[in-house]
Amino acid sequence: MELADFLSALKEVRKDQVVVTTMASAREWPNYSDGPLDLNYAPSSMGQGPALGLGIALARPERQVIVLNGDGCTLMNLGVLVTIAGLRPVNLVLFNLENGVYEVTGGQKLAGSGRVGFTGVARSAGWERVYEIKEAEELRRELPGILRGNGPVFINVKLVARPGPSPKPRRPMPETLRMLSEALAAGSAGRQAR
Ligand SMILES: [Mg+2]
């Protein structure tokens, strides 16, 4: 599946969740959504998406937080998988976007590409809800249920590699953070019943 297939499917089901993006997902997600609840953390945050999402999820337990993380990002900060599994934030959803390359640095082959099994890594780190999705149709069918259930949830999504440039922030990062902070302080209707 293409990254665009994944992002458009997510946009269709996304409600008032925070969406944290870094690296390649940060380059593309603003084309789908660029509001106060989109923490488009660019340009320099490889591996930090899950930790950013965890912090928000713990601080705002009424709000679901969706993190889009590249496979290279996940490998760069594997320890955070153990931290999240240990803290068990029910409102955190982590998508691992597996395309087998370091996309924004030129498409170099991922360390361990073709050998590492991300769902196995997540399970061994202590995650109980773990999915792997390969096809766009399967993704559209499964996404609503994935977002309804309690987290933390790890979803490995198999993607075609499309190397491209590094993301450029659409506004200064302090402004992005101020917008998110104000939106979170304004509250939400609460998480959907699960
Ligand atoms: Mg990648």
Image (cartoon, rainbow, N blue to C red):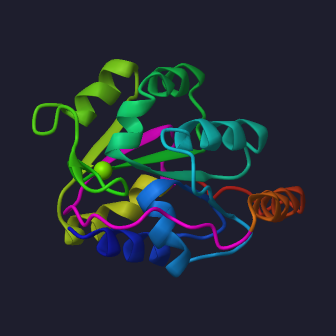
- Above or below, 6 relative to 123: below
Q: Is residue 156 left or right of residue 16?
A: left
98 up-or-down from 142: above or below: above
135 is within the stretch colored magenta: no
Q: Nearer the viewer, residue 105 or 179?
A: 105
86 left or right of 73?
Answer: right
- Given residues 127 and 71, the one toward you in this image is 71
Side of 103 relative to 150 (left or right):
left
- x then y, percent, for residue 33: 58, 77
Q: Which residues are the magenta region?
A: 148-171
- Residue shown at 32%/44% (left/top)? 71
> At 11% from the left edge and 32% from the top edge, which residue is drawn?
115
**Residue 5 percent location from the top left of the image:** 30, 74
x and y, in percent, of residue 155 in the image:
35, 47
> x, y percentage for residue 60?
76, 45
User: In the picture, residue 92 is in which quadrant?
Assistant: top right
Q: What secondary structure do most residues of the magenta stretch adopt?
A: loop
